[in-house]
Amino acid sequence: MNATLGTVFVALGLVASAAGVATVAGGLVTRTPSLVVRSRTWAWILAVAAVGQVVVMERALITRDFTVAFVAEHGSHRTPALFNVATLWSALEGSILLWVLILVGYLVLVVRRFRDRLGDPMVGWTLLVMFTVCAFFFFLLAGPAQPFGRFEPWVGYDGPGPNPLLQNHVLMAFHPPVLYLGYVGFTVPFALAVASLATGRLGEGWLLEARRWTLVAWGCLTVGIILGAWWSYDVLGWGGYWAWDPVENASFLPWLTGTAYLHSVMVQERQGMLRVWNLSLLCSTFALTILGTFITRSGVLESVHAFTESGIGPLLLGFFALVVATTVGLIAWRGDALRTPGSIESPVSRTGAFLANNLLFGAFAFVVLLGTVFPLLVEAARGDRIAVGNPYFERMTMPVGFALLFLRARGTRLAVGSGGHRGPFDPTAVAGGGRGGGHGGGRDPGEPGLGADPGCGAGGLRSRRGDPPPGAGCPSSGPAWLGRGVQRGMVVHVGVAVVAVAFACSSAFVRQAEFRFDEVGDSATFAGQNWSSMGFRR
């Protein structure tokens, strides 16, 4: 019953997503807005299919319905109730179900968000991209990642249950879903970027919307990464929270490019510059989520987190290539229109600092990406299997990390336009707070931004060329120089500084050694302590 019903929901989702693609594409090609408006019906049908298939699978897991192949392979009567529910995302097929559920959820939110503008070509292209991504993942569920295959259990059959390491911490129930909310959430800003390129509406109007969706995805991804590090620290012990594992890197890469975008987009909002940078960063972030999915779910790289080898690897790699080729082609096509008359007057300026920030984040991402995929390149070229360990990542990322911290601390002391920097007393320089609330970029003066505003930070304390008058655009309530947006940016950047200090201290005081205990009572001395074997257990 569960297997049949689940298969029906998968088929319904595949048909609805394909119909959504056809409906929106037809409306755009024939310039018939009413067709695009009708696509919202397919979005709601997709929601029914996505929710239905997850509910059916959870029901099968809770009732231990071993006639469903996924439950037979990953469920067990011995699994505690909480982890029995979380078994859904402990293996390949179930994790794709969760991915699709979140993706369709974002699609429905987009439809609701733009319900009064569905006839706008910009919205139409956004929906077309999202329906296409939905169709691809439903195709995976209908084919190589089929979660509702049938199994004939014998009398007394009990499955193996999830990996024991996935049943020893409550964060198993929260870390993957939160991480997926961030990972999948980058689909929306990517769709907006493609829509901007396809329609030729390359001005700053779409930026605010893209930034809002990026902030949501980036925030969820940040929390997910932190929860993963916390889980690792509690489970593995001995201070281990990050090991530069390929799957850890797969979540870190889009975080790096997403962070770069959230900083550089402020330059475009204010000065209309860095358009190509921002579009490239948005598209790269989504492409890296697809590449990360390939790394995680294809089994091509050895990892304590990765799923076993499966048949979806080539499909994911092909989809990644399609995303890259499409976005590169669109950016090249709109190359002339993306050029802006403005230029960076001086590298020693706020705009120059943002550009340097982009270059450093890009370099950081490239170093991590190269170390992650290098074993694949070597195996493809020579047939040898190698591993890139912590020494490479620590040696290569440390200089870039220090440069980023220095830029964070000094960047906000620079003028927005030409060279020069601020006076010695500048509260906004703490941990490198960026632009945020107050005013800026031709927007509503009361609109909050991402970080510290260059004018509010030292209003009434000093003046410089290009600054607003003392107090201009600064909130009158609360601390004299802090607005709501400023406070948020300060919290984020001070938090980054604290985390950086914690990383440095934890790395500097690490001690490690290896011992072999063959029998009960064997002992060794380490870090001034005597360690004895009390026994062995499986």
Image (cartoon, helix red, strand yellow):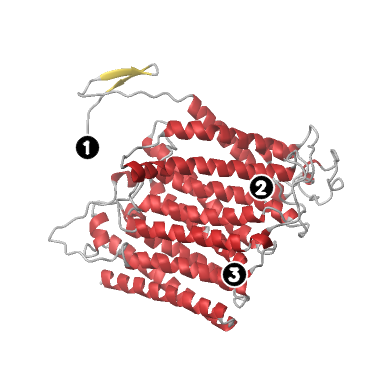
Mark 2 neighbour class, 10 Å CA radius: few under 14, some 14 to 19, many 20 or more: many
**Residue on which the image places disc 2:** 488
Q: Is residue 412 visible?
A: yes
Question: Is 447 left or right of 385, judged from the image as shown?
Answer: right
Residue 126 screen position, x and y as percent: 56, 68
The answer to whether residue 490 is seen in the rendering is: no
Earlier in the chain: of badge 2 and badge 3, it is 3
Which numbered tag is attached to residue 538? 1
Question: Which numbered disc covers residue 428?
Answer: none
**SS at mark 3 in the image:** helix
The numbered disc on residue 113 is: 3
Q: Amino acid at mark 1?
A: Arg
> Distance of mark 1 from mark 3, alpha carbons?
53 Å
Q: Residues within 10 Å of mark 1 (few under 14, many from 20)?
A: few
Q: Nearer the viewer, mark 1 or mark 3?
A: 3
In the image: residue 29, left or right of residue 239: right
The residue depicted at 24 percent of the width and 54 percent of the height is 76
Density class for disc 3 (Cα within 10 Å; few <14, some 14-19, many ≥20) is few
User: Of the residues shown, which amino acid type is indicated by label 3?
Assistant: Arg
Q: Which numbered disc, 2 or 1, marks the residue that appears first in the sequence?
A: 2
Q: Quadrant of residue 139?
A: bottom left
Give the CA separation, mark 2 to mark 1.
48 Å
Tell me the amino acid under the disc marked 2: Arg
Position of residue 316 measured from the top left corner of the image (x, y, whole percent): 39, 58
